[in-house]
Amino acid sequence: MNANNSPWLHQLKATRPIDIINENVKADIIIVGAGISGVMTAYFTLKYTNKSVIILEGNKVAHGATGHNAGQIVADFERELSDLVSEYGLEKAAAAERDVRGAWLLLEEIFEEANLETPFSTFVGYNGFREHDHIIEELKDNAIRSEAGLQTYPVYIANDFEGVKNIPSEFKNLYELVPRADILSLLETKDHSYAAAVALRKGCVNSALLCEELIGYLLAKYKGRFALFEHTSVENLELEKESTKLFLETARRDNSPEEKYSASAEKVILCTNGFERLSIKNLFGGDIDTKFHQMINGDVGYMAGFVEELKEPPTALGYYDQKGDKDVYGTKDYFYITRRPFEMENKQIHNLICIGGPEKEIGQTQDYDRRAEFSPEMGQKIDKFAKKTLKNAEKKDLEYRFQWHGVMCYTPTKMRIIGPEPKNQTLIYNLGCNGVGILASIYGGWKIAKILAGEKFASSIFDPRG
C-alpha cells in the first residue's frame, strides 16, 4: 500500500495530456490552484464572463487537498450558527448559511450543463450527539434558522434521555421525541450512548474525479480562452494598480534544471489551501498584512476505507461528543463515515465505507508532507472507533483497502475567504477549506465570477478583512 493511498486518486482516468509551461504567458484572469476551488472558479468565470483564463497548478489537477479529502458534501461550517450570530449578527450569519446551501443547486447545474459522469449521490444524512449541551446548541441553531426564515433541520431526541427535562420550553417545537432504538437505527450504530440525531442533506462525490472531468469539459468548450499548466509553482506575486505579475517555477520531467517564467494578468485568484510559500508584494497602496497570511494554519486529517458488497444505499453519518474517549481516539470530538458505490478493478462495483476523524495540528500549511507515511497510530484510532460504534464491525477484521491523509487549511475566523484583497483588488481570494470545503468552494467560485462580471454584493462574513 502507498504511503498516502487515496481512493479518489485511485479512480482518476489520467488520460488528459499534461501541459507544462515553457514560455511567459498572459491572460485576463490567472487562477492559482487546480483543486475543487480553482476548477469551480474557472468554470463560473468562463461561463459568466468573456475573459481568458489560465490555471496554474504546482502539482497535478486535484492532487492536493481535493484528492485527499473525505469526499463528503454538506452545507456546514466549523462554527455553530449561534456563534456566528454573536460575532456577525443574524442577517449576515443567516445569509452565509443560505449562500452555501444554495451551492447544492449550483452543483446540480454543473452536472447537467457539462453532462458529467462522475458518480454523485445526495441523500438525508444524520449527525449523532451524546451530550445535553451539544443537543441544546443544535436546538439554538434551529431556533435561529426559524427566526431567519431558513429551513430548520429535523432533530430527534431519545424519549428516555434524562436531559430532556432540562430542554428549555422555547425549543419545544424544534425537536421530536422518539424511541432510542430509532436514534440508533438512523445513526447505524450499536452505541447506546447516543441520545439525539439531526437530519440534514448530505452527499458523496469524488471531488478529484469531478475536477478532472470538468477540466476536460472546459478545455474542449473554451478552446482559445482557457489553458491549464501543471507542475508550475508560483513563487512571487507583484500587484500593480490594474494588473498582476506572477513569477513562476516549472518542474521538468527530465530532471533538468527548473526553469523560470512569468505570467501577467488583470487579476489573479488564489484558490490554494493556504498561502504556502507564496510571497506577495503590493506595488500600489499599502503593504498587504503578512500576519494574516501567516495565520492560515493547517491540520492533517486521517481517513481509512474498506469495501463491502453493494447492498446498502449511500449515506454520510457524523458522530459527535467523543470527548470522554480522547485518550482512545485522539480526536477533537468528532468521527464520520461515508458509504457510496465505488468501482474497483475489473469494473466491479462495491460499497466503499470511509471513516475519518483523527487530526494532527501542523501549524503552517507548508509544513505538510503529502508523501508522508500513513500514521499506524491514527489507523488504530479509526479501527477502535469503528469496532465500538458500527454495527457488526467488532465481529470481523476490517481490511482497509485505502488509508490516506490530507491537509485542511483553517483561516483565523474558520470561514472561507471569498473576494478581493482590500488593499489591492487585482488580488482575489477563494481559499480556506476549514474542514468543510466542497460547497463553499463552489459558492466562492460562483461569487467571484459574478464580481468579475460587474455584480455588486452586500458585505459578507466571507469578505477578506482589511
Image (cartoon, rainbow, N blue to C red):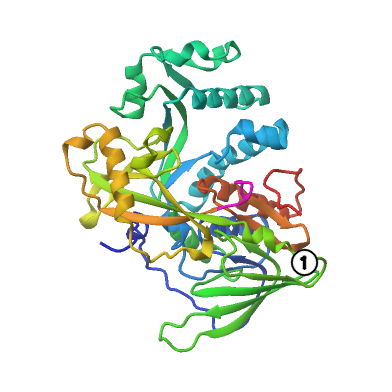
The residue identified by callout 1 is 287
Residue occupying the point 45% across, 89% down: 256
Residue type highlighted by circle 1:
Asp
Looking at the rendered image, the quarter that the C terminus falls into is bottom right
Image coordinates of residue 12 in percent, x first then y, are 36, 61
Q: Secondary structure at mark 1?
A: loop
State whether residue 209 appears in this view. no
Q: Is residue 118 above or below residue 159?
A: below
Residue sitting at the far front: 327
**Rendered view: 62 above or below 152:** below
Q: Nearer the viewer, residue 85 or 297?
A: 297
Q: What residue do we see at 35% from left, 17% from top?
A: 180
Magenta span dominant secondary structure: loop
- Asked which quadrant contains residue 16, the reply is bottom left
Residue depicted at x 71% and y 49%:
463
Is residue 201 shown in magenta? no
Up-down relation of residue 350 to residue 64 (above or below): above
Asked which quadrant contains residue 265, the reply is bottom right
Q: Is residue 374 visible?
A: yes
> In the image, residue 434 lies at what x, y percent?
54, 48
The region drawn magenta spans: 410-416
Label 1: how many residues lie within 10 Å, few (<14), some (14-19) or many (20+)?
A: few
Q: Quadrant of the N terminus?
A: bottom left
Residue reaching furthest to the bottom: 256
The answer to whether residue 256 is left or right of residue 193 is: right
Q: How many marks?
A: 1
Towards the viewer: 121 or 152: 152
Q: Is residue 413 magenta?
A: yes
